Image (spheres, rainbow, N blue to C red):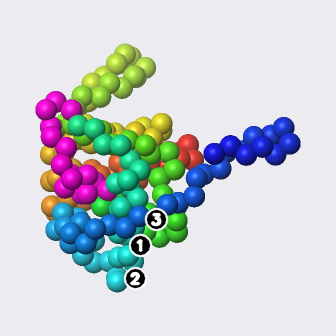
Amino acid sequence: MLTSIGFLLVRRKAPYQKFDLPLIDQQSLEDIVPLSRYLPLPLQTKYHQKVAAFLNQIYFKTYHGLTLTHEMKLMIAGHACLLTLNKGDRHFRKLHSVHIMPEAFVQEQGQAHGVSHHNVHGVSFENGKVVLAWNATENGAKNHFDGKNVALHEFSHQFDQEDGN
């Protein structure tokens, strides 16, 4: 939203919209996002509203024959929204889409001596796009103690990238 102040244009963030998450999705989150089981009761309502808003506002796309399911979207949204719980009504300001590959994918990186190729499980871009390997996302969600949750990792980069870090 643009607002005119004299000759200066200021970009304002659209107000945070509240959505309700169906009870069946609330119950599913406890299974597919194990960390959500430990949320204190006062945070659970806030968490469910943030997940519902994420599902309603973010575009999901799959590649290479991977079929997008509601459970996949719920798992990804559930992990991403854990990062927003203590940020008031703040949400991912730039994020607009999540792209899901079946497994690790190749990313080209420019270096001083040419281009290198790396197999990666996730990438976050400053333009508001996150790419995740589904197998790594699913495996990372199963064991919340191993420190290998690619969804948490990539969505935390989205916060970093909002202010250019």
**Residue situated in front as seen by the camera: 46 or 35:** 46
The residue that label 1 is drawn on is 46
Q: CA distance from mark 3 to mark 2?
A: 16 Å
The reply to whether the magenta stretch includes residue 70 is: yes
Answer with mark 3 or mark 2, whichever residue precedes in sequence: 3
Residue located beneath label 3 in the image = 18
Relative horizontal placement of residue 149, taking residue 12 as reference (left or right) = left
- Are the residues flagged by discs 3 and 2 in contact, CB closer than 8 Å? no
Magenta residue span: 63-77
Image x and y of residue 139, in percent: 15, 53
Residue type, numbered disc 1 = Lys
**Which type of secondary structure does the marked residue at label 1 adopt?**
helix
- Check contact, mark 2 vs mark 1: CB within 8 A: yes
The numbered disc on residue 42 is 2
Q: Amino acid at mark 2?
A: Pro
State the image quarter where residue 95 is shown: top left
